Image: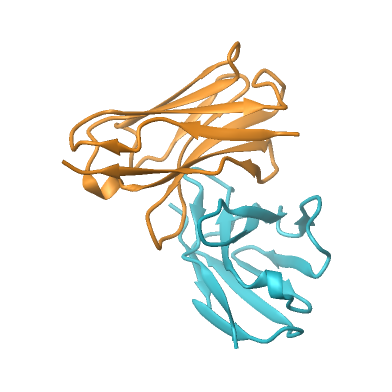
Amino acid sequence: QITLKESGPTLVKPTQTLTLTCTLSGLSLSTSGVGVAWLRQPPGKAPEWLALIYWDNDKYYNPSLQSRVTVSKDTSKNQVVLIMTNMDPLDTATYFCAHRIVEQGLDYWGPGMLVTVSS
Amino acid sequence: DVQMTQSPSTLSASVGDRVTISCRASHNVNTWLAWFQQKPGKAPKLLIYKTATLQNGVPSRFSGSGSGAEYSLTISSLQPDDFATYYCQQYSGYPWTFGQGTKVEIK
């Protein structure tokens, strides 16, 4: 059974850096074709894709956030980390990580975690 | 970026109705199109990928079709569990983008 879970701070101050960790179980990040995406969803709005990292360490970013976002993986821990700098109240959202296999959809999602940016 | 536009934004229907949600892309997405269902406080759930491939475990009353820049999701007979918000998402190119959502409400 494949599961993902996000962890990190639920409250950050403006200008601070957010670090979120996605821990996966039931699959290996080193398996060919595996990718993990980060997405976020502000309250009442549609999801927004942020970044994606593949088993071979290929990385893709949303250009609208590329200068602020970094994604990395630790295969030994089966974790993917998202770092987002210079947080703003507009970054308040539920942050999700999700699994995909190349050419398929985002089939497994973490439950999400609400991150609030406020002083 | 590829802009995704769904219609309608809200749909009122009854149990047993056949409903169709449309999704239009600003560019050809070459059938790299997925549909998600989301309920309040939950993560999106993948229903369909590659335009028409049903994800494992998804009831066969859900179906997808389309090509080029025009796609649709059909629920053949709406069930009580289907009242939710639906999103289309293109993964033809980066950045991946979502439609604004269609909320299916009880009539």
In the image, taking residue A48 as reference, residue A119 lies left or right, namely: left
Q: Residue at x 56, y 82 (%)?
A: B11
Q: Residue A45 location in percent, x, y?
A: 41, 61
Question: Which of A93 and B22 lies nearest the eye of the viewer?
Answer: A93
Q: Quadrant of residue B81?
A: bottom right
Q: Is residue B30 visible?
A: no
Q: Is residue B53 visible?
A: yes
Q: Is residue B60 above or below residue B56?
A: below
Q: Residue B59 location in percent, x, y?
A: 81, 63
Q: Residue furthest top?
A: A76
What colour do you see for chain A? Answer: orange
Q: Is residue B41 above or below residue A73?
A: below
In the image, taking residue B60 as reference, residue B46 lies left or right, namely: left
Q: How many marks?
A: 0
Q: Residue B51 location in percent, x, y?
A: 71, 58
What colour do you see for chain B? Answer: cyan
Q: Quadrant of residue B34?
A: bottom right
Q: Is residue A68 above or below residue B92?
A: above
